Amino acid sequence: MDDNQNVKIKVRGLSKVFGKHPEKALELRNQGMKRPEILEQTGQTLGLSNIDFDVHEGELLVVMGLSGSGKSTLIRCLNRLIDTSEGEIVIDDENIPDLSEKALLECRRRHFSMVFQNFALFPHRTVQKNAEFGLEVRNISKSERFKLARNSLAQVGLDGWEDAYPSQLSGGMQQRVGLARALANDASVLLMDEAFSALDPLIRKDMQQELMQLQAETQKTTVFITHDLDEALNIGDRIVLLKDGEIVQNGTPEEILTNPADDYVRRFIEGVDMSRILTAENAMRRVRETARETDGPRTVLHKMRENSIDSIYVMGRNRKLLGLLEVDAASQAIDQGADTVLDYMTQDFRRVKPDEPMQNLFAMFSEKGFPIAVEDDEERLLGVVVKGAVLDELARAGDQ
Amino acid sequence: MDIVRIPLGSWIEGGLNWLTSEYSIVTRGISRVTQTGIDGLNNSLMWLPEWALMAIIVALCWKASSTRLAIGAAAGLALIWNMGLWDPMIETLTLVVIATLVAVVIALPVGIAAALSERLYRGIMPVLDFMQTMPAFVYLIPAIPFFGIGSVSAIFATVIFSMPPAIRFTTLGIRQVPSDLIEAADAYGATRSQKLFKVQLPLSLPTLMAGINQTIMLALSMVVIAAMIGADGLGSEVWRAIQRLRPGDGFEAGIAVVILAMLLDRLTQSLRGSRS
């Protein structure tokens, strides 16, 4: 696993047996038995077996699996809503399974906020009071928690609804309250248990977008549970795939799509794997603004600022694509008194034809994450493909 | 062939006698405190002129519920006053209020404890069944050696008879709180008492109020019966009517009980509704 990123939560050898004599089940497991045999012999369910993974500081980690895969158990083991049977969960040098009752409360307050599938809002409390709950439990002063809860409600777009009761809100808004309750607490890890699964598809997409935006702004370490591959691909920095209580694959969305670890994963993404027929054209977006070769550096810089973009394609006559200009290079050109930007362009991006299979696109995104340019046979720029669009398109194809 | 009869009755009698003689200081103490409470409440309610108390009750009904209930209350109370049953009605009301207070004060903690501990729950439920199914009159008998003839005995029997629903509903209410809300409270690091006071109790309040409503109704029926052991109030009016064979007087007192019952019932029910 990646060593150069800070590990926030380290999970090692985590197992969970549902039953009165977990040691028996674990012994059978060590002899190589699987879940169904263990159930038959001991009457106990092996919920999770030997789970190893890290959650890195600031990442959005998705744990994905079908029902019965143990994903809900896993997220509840992290903050010990469910006691573990074996293994370590280390957060800031504390091993959660070892904590005393009191230390556990403290740990939950400091480290974990949770958002639930069915919202789990308190019906007798107003939206404001719901958002304050975590702070109230921590005995934060009244004025302080009022302010913090207000802020987080504003963050999720619920200003003006503070005095409403949860029953007066739609499902999407209720989950925003759930999210605000979690954010107000400012714990170091956000746990989201199928948080968007109960919402209808359109609102769900919105919420996913907003979560990604929030996460990009706040860099909040997030563990997100879902049974939905589209969702996982759409929002996850990394995905941990669970099956029957074991991890089958742990990687970035691209890695999982392009290089499924085994047949299970392959079958899983089969619906999604339409990439062979999908091409760059499907995921292509129109270019918002381009520069002309005759534009001076100041004009180009102005165009970039106007559109708040940090790189721009430069076109020759007949819309022929000449290169890409970054904002730094443009200012450099101005500093050096150049009257053309042509010498400052970079070619460090990929060009593809519209019929390029989408599968091939993953590998092409450069380090800097410049979009891929799609051009026709005369090298005229037709559009660009950004990373997210590829995943979106694949996910949508999976739906059909 | 003779089968040996198990002397259950004499065992119980022996136990009660022992209790009476050993704990006479305790029972006398309870008796004195309760009697003071009854007299105090009685006197203060009777010190108010009839119309003033009526106005207070009507205003309460109007505030907590509806104009309809307020009008009904005014008409009903006026009828009681007119029938000359005002003072007995106050005496009955006092007994009900005190018995309910005592019952609820005992029932709340017991109900909460039973909701939180499975073992206590299993232990306490048969006791509650026993308390509720035992014919109410039976409680009157040991009450007399404990507290003598009169209102204190009535309160004792009434508390025992009317307490079970308050315990049951409290337990039920707390157990009915959805588990995902408990989980949410846990996830944010709430302590047991934070969970109880911020989540479980507020959410079980409607059920809890239903239990208190039941307790009040049972208490009312019991304090009427308790006239047999010398409790004052509307019950003793009925009792006297029976002994003198005067059905008219009996029905008048009975109607007063019904009015009081309906008033208390509607009033507590609306309190429950307005809180949620």
Image: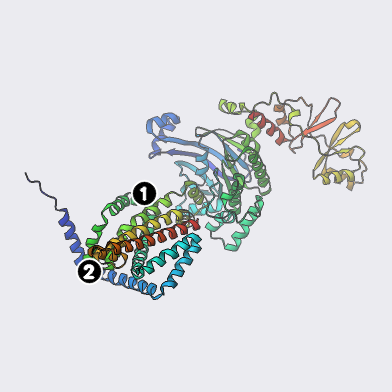
**A248 lies above or below A203:** above
Q: Secondary structure at mark 1?
A: helix
Asked if the residues shown at circle 2 and circle 1 are in contact, with their CB atoms under 8 angstroms apart, the answer is no
Which chain letter matches label 1? B
Say left or right for A300 vs B220.
right
Residue tagged 2: B24
Residue, disc 1 = B118
Question: Image check: A300 left or right of A1?
Answer: right
**Alpha-carbon span between mark 2 and mark 1:** 35 Å
Provide the chain ID for the residue under circle 2: B
Q: Quadrant of residue A200?
A: top right
Number of other residues with Cα within 10 Å of mark 1, as a class: few under 14, some 14 to 19, many 20 or more:
few
- Left or right for B205, reference B220: right
The answer to whether residue A162 is above or below residue B144 is: above
**Quadrant containing the N terminus of chain A in the rendered view:** top right
Q: Amino acid at mark 1?
A: Glu
The residue tagged with tag 2: helix, strand or loop? helix
Q: Nearer the viewer, residue B216 or A138?
A: B216
The amino acid type found where label 2 is placed reads Ser
| Mark 2 / mark 1, whichever is N-terminal | 2
Q: Is residue B15 left or right of residue A302?
A: left
What colouring style does the render use?
rainbow
